Image (cartoon, rainbow, N blue to C red):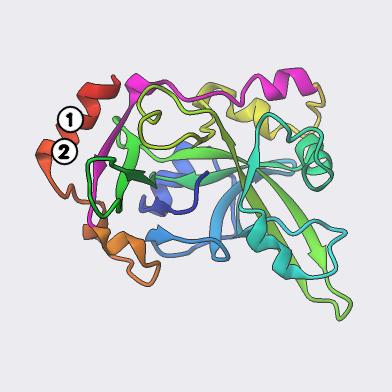
Amino acid sequence: MCGRFVRKSALTEITDEFAVDEIQWAGEPSYNIAPGQDIAVVIHDGKNQLVTCRWGLIPGWAKDETIGYKMINARAETIAEKRSFAKPFRTQRCLIVADGFYEWQKHERDRDRKKNPIYVRLRSGKPFGFAGIYDRWKSKDDKRIMSCTIITTEPNSLLRSIHNRMPVIIEPNFRDLWLDKDMLEIDRLTALLKPYEAGSMEAYEVSPQVNSPKNDRPDLIKPASPERDIQILKEES
């Protein structure tokens, strides 16, 4: 799964990277984004728009918004079939802007069996887009929320020893296709939901301060140990 991520790039870098035509979001960088928070998302509605979306999908048919906390991720293997995800997958796809994400790795050699936080990012240092879907929800008293979920798939060789799932990252050349509302070919869309190229990514252990979403500082993504960083890259590359 993907339960925490980072978005630190400047607004100008995000708009350039994702060819944004209209900006409706202007949030601050965050180094420890958690479910339930508002995040930056790119959608296409005649043009590429950078908008605000709550992390945790609330289906349009839901009676209560709290269901969103159970829907922070959607499995690529079943997304076209699940009631909550099938309709948005067809016409409400988005790119969730990120610079990296955290996973927690358990080491069998550790007596206390603690899970160590690992930060994963692209080697290029550029921001990227998680594959996502979104929906719009309205309560009986007319409260309106736009929400989304991150699609996950099986891990690549870098992530395999860290976690049994990884978020889908849409390759830049396929972003327009993913956002195109007129693209209704399920097979072409599901073909994009694959593990990202391991050689283009890197991972290293970071401070356990990440464990609390209350902590949100730039130093959270600094390596806890350079030796640990090298070990992970050698084992999984």
Q: Amino acid at mark 2?
A: Arg
Badge 1, how many Cα within 10 Å: few under 14, some, many 20+? few
Indicate yes or no whether the magenta region holds residue 188.
Answer: yes
Magenta residues (range): 186-207
Side of 11 where 221 appears, left or right = left
Badge 2, how many Cα within 10 Å: few under 14, some, many 20+? some
- List x then y, in percent, for residue 96: 55, 46
Marks 1 and 2: CB-CB under 8 Å? yes
Q: What is the number of the mark on residue 228?
A: 2
- Under circle 2, the secondary element is helix
- List x then y, in percent, for residue 14: 44, 46
Q: Is residue 33 above or below residue 123?
A: below
Please report the residue visible at 48 percent of the width from the left and 34 percent of the height from the top.
164
> Residue lying furthest bottom in this view?
141
Quarter of the image holding residue 140? bottom right
Work out how far the residue at label 1 is from the one at label 2, CA to CA, in angstroms.
5 Å
Indicate yes or no whether the magenta region holds residue 10.
Answer: no
Q: Which residue is mark 1?
A: 231
Side of 190 where 116 appears, left or right = left
- List x then y, in percent, for residue 23: 57, 55
Please report the residue visible at 38 percent of the width from the left and 22 percent of the height from the top.
157
- List x then y, in percent, for residue 146: 71, 60
Side of 122 where 135 appears, left or right = right
Q: Quadrant of the C terminus?
A: top left
